[in-house]
Image (tube, rainbow, N blue to C red):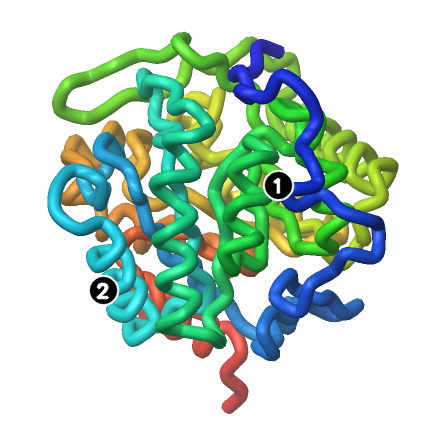
Amino acid sequence: MTLPSSGLASGVSSASGVSSASGVSSASGVSSASGVSSNDRALQWGARPYIMGIVNVTPDSFSGDGLARDGDMIAAGVAQAAQFLADGADILDIGGESTRPGAEPVPVAEEIARTQPVIAAIRDAFPQAILSIDSFKAETAAAALDAGADWINDVWAFQADPQMAPLAKARGCPVVLMHNRSKPGHADIDRRLGGSYKAPDYADFLAEVLDELRTIITRALDAGIAPENIILDPGVGFGKTVAQNMALINCLDRVRALGYPVLLGASRKSFIGRVLDVEADERVDGTAATTALGVVRGADIFRVHDVRQMAHVARMTHAMLTATP
């Protein structure tokens, strides 16, 4: 598998936050067997769907909502966080590097400069919020955890940076680990509908995805990650065809059967645009369909741009599934 460069020539130093195995800070997300708690806000898996709002501190987000294009990105990040929390977000996922097809790599120093001050400001403004750093680089993740982030969201599941697993172990924080067979630079780009990563050849798509998720789990456990800190992301939009993305969402119950909470990240993605022939800012309805089906199939977390709408969809779908006459 071709992986992006992590930008780290050596291990993460003690200054960047990898300390002793006992170095679990109060903000790092102490976990329980039935869920994860961060800053005294417990998430009980299976109790209800949870919403993760996307805070893009980038100039080039595929969805056009990047906060680093102009103006005061720190103030913009705090304002967006406030709105998302008011709209029903349970978690805020802050990222400083676009993972869209065709995006240029961002140096570690620049990614930290984008994300760390925004995370620190959001933490100061909302002490009880659960914050996640969206990065596959250990140095960036360490800086984010130091600034007040609780979770790591790694789209390469510890494969891009050998220091990420030791960092997550040392901090004792929840980690989102994603299935990803995409290859940076191997993408089909459509100016109107956006890019999509070219899918590799699968002999048996679902079986292979499940097997590779099992490998991700084993790798994390072998690295010392506590089982209760593992969250799986099946990787919708990363190295899968339009049909494979949709089939994967329809089979999320198979992913959930692996025994770990599942995050679905389908919001505004290009497969929705290709099915409905709409651009990124017109994909709320399509995202709602993926959210509703995801709730039915047992997904626990929904990473979305349109927080208020998806919170309503998830809440209503869950209410219908659990209603008793």
Quarter of the image for residue 229 reads bottom right
On residue 16, the disc is 1
Is 9 rendered above or below residue 20?
above
Q: Visible in this render: residue 261?
A: yes
Callout 2 amino acid = Ala
Is 294 rendered above or below residue 91?
above
Q: Nearer the viewer, residue 24 or 45?
A: 24
Q: Position of residue 297 (x, y in %)?
A: 55, 55
The residue wearing badge 2 is 79
Q: Visible in this render: residue 292?
A: no
On residue 61, the disc is none
Q: Position of residue 1 (x, y in %)?
A: 62, 11
Q: Is residue 82 left or right of residue 191?
A: right
Q: Position of residue 79 (x, y in %)?
A: 23, 64
Is 112 rendered above or below residue 231?
above
Residue in the image at 62% along x and 41% along y:
16
